[in-house]
């Protein structure tokens, strides 16, 4: 049976070594160790990684992939299918729900466009002018990223962006202070794959401050991925970064990525 170092497995599977280490930490991809402490993998790890990658393409979360792996290890396809079927059914329900939300939001935008196409009133904007509209009931997601356009990016496909901040000294200290002031208003936080998620009140000034800081952070730290999701009741910011950026994530946001 062949054995592979982590760099070899990363090249063979087209999965970054940082992701392989994350899978090991998450209990998805066990690795043996050499006497010198280096990770080594066998052919079973190659098959296991292929199964993980396939499950991720189906949109399954890591918790469900971990469950499937326990069944997959038994080597009975019928059992894997039996466990996977309700998971896929749930993903279909989720996808249909997102389609409905996007359709409703598209209809909302179409109504706004129709209003804006009408002759404008005399004077300033008012309740009937079309420029002012009630908030849609569906969330509006905005991504701040230089590496991928997806609203909820996955770190696996991240190009090799250098983990380096162009700010230093007073500029960096000022940015950290600005983030800490904003974070004082956070109403919740949680760890997510490759980063963290923060929840804020949907206060217009606070939303503007968070968006401004996220945009500015992209200007000096291009390896960050920010996703802002705005609903009538809350602003949710997801932050993701490579493993090597963990010290900076901790410094900025006060939690471990």
Image (spheres, grey):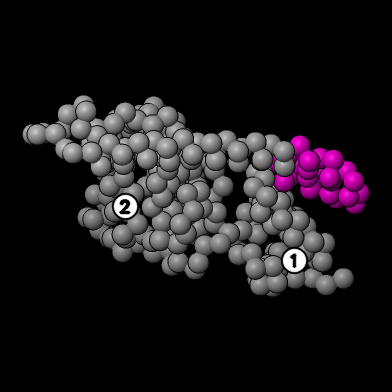
- Front-most of residues 67 and 242: 67
Q: Residue at x 36, y 59 (%)?
A: 221
Q: Residue at x 57, y 35 (%)?
A: 97
Point out the residue furthest to the front here: 119
**Percent position of residue 232, x then y:** 37, 29
Residue 188 appears in view: yes
Q: Main secondary structure of the magenta part?
A: helix
**Percent position of residue 228, x then y:** 40, 43
- In the picture of the structure, the residue carrying the numbered disc 1 is 40
Which residues lie in the magenta part?
Answer: 64-87
Q: Earlier in the sequence, mark 1 or mark 2?
A: 1
Q: Quadrant of residue 120?
A: top left
Q: Residues within 10 Å of mark 2 (few under 14, many from 20)?
A: some
The N terminus is located in which quarter?
bottom right
Q: Is residue 29 left or right of residue 185?
A: right
Q: Is residue 113 left or right of residue 38?
A: left
């Amino acid at each position: 049976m062949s054995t592979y170092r982590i760099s070899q497995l990363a090249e063979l599977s087209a999965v970054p070594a940082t992701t392989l280490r994350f899978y090991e930490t998450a209990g998805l991809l066990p690795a043996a160790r050499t006497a010198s402490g280096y990770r080594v993998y066998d052919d079973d790890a190659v098959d296991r990684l292929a199964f993980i990658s396939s499950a991720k393409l189906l949109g399954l979360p890591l918790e469900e992939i971990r469950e499937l792996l326990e069944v997959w290890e038994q080597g009975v396809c019928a059992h894997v299918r039996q466990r996977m079927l309700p998971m896929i059914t749930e993903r279909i329900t989720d996808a249909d729900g997102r389609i409905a939300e996007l359709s409703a939001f598209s209809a909302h935008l179409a109504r706004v466009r129709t209003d804006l196409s009408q002759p404008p009133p005399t004077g300033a904007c008012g309740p009937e002018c079309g420029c002012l509209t009630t908030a849609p009931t569906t969330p509006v997601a905005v991504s701040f990223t230089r590496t991928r356009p997806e609203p909820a990016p996955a770190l696996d496909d991240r190009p090799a962006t250098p983990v380096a901040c162009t700010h230093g000294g007073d500029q960096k200290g000022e940015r950290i202070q600005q983030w800490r002031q904003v974070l004082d208003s956070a109403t919740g936080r949680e760890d997510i794959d490759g980063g963290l998620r923060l929840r804020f009140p949907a206060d217009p000034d606070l939303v503007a401050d968070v968006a401004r800081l996220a945009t500015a952070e992209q200007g000096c730290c291009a390896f960050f991925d920010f996703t802002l999701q705005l609903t009538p009741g809350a602003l949710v910011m997801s932050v993701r970064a490579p493993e090597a950026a963990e010290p900076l994530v901790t410094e900025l946001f006060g939690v471990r990525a």
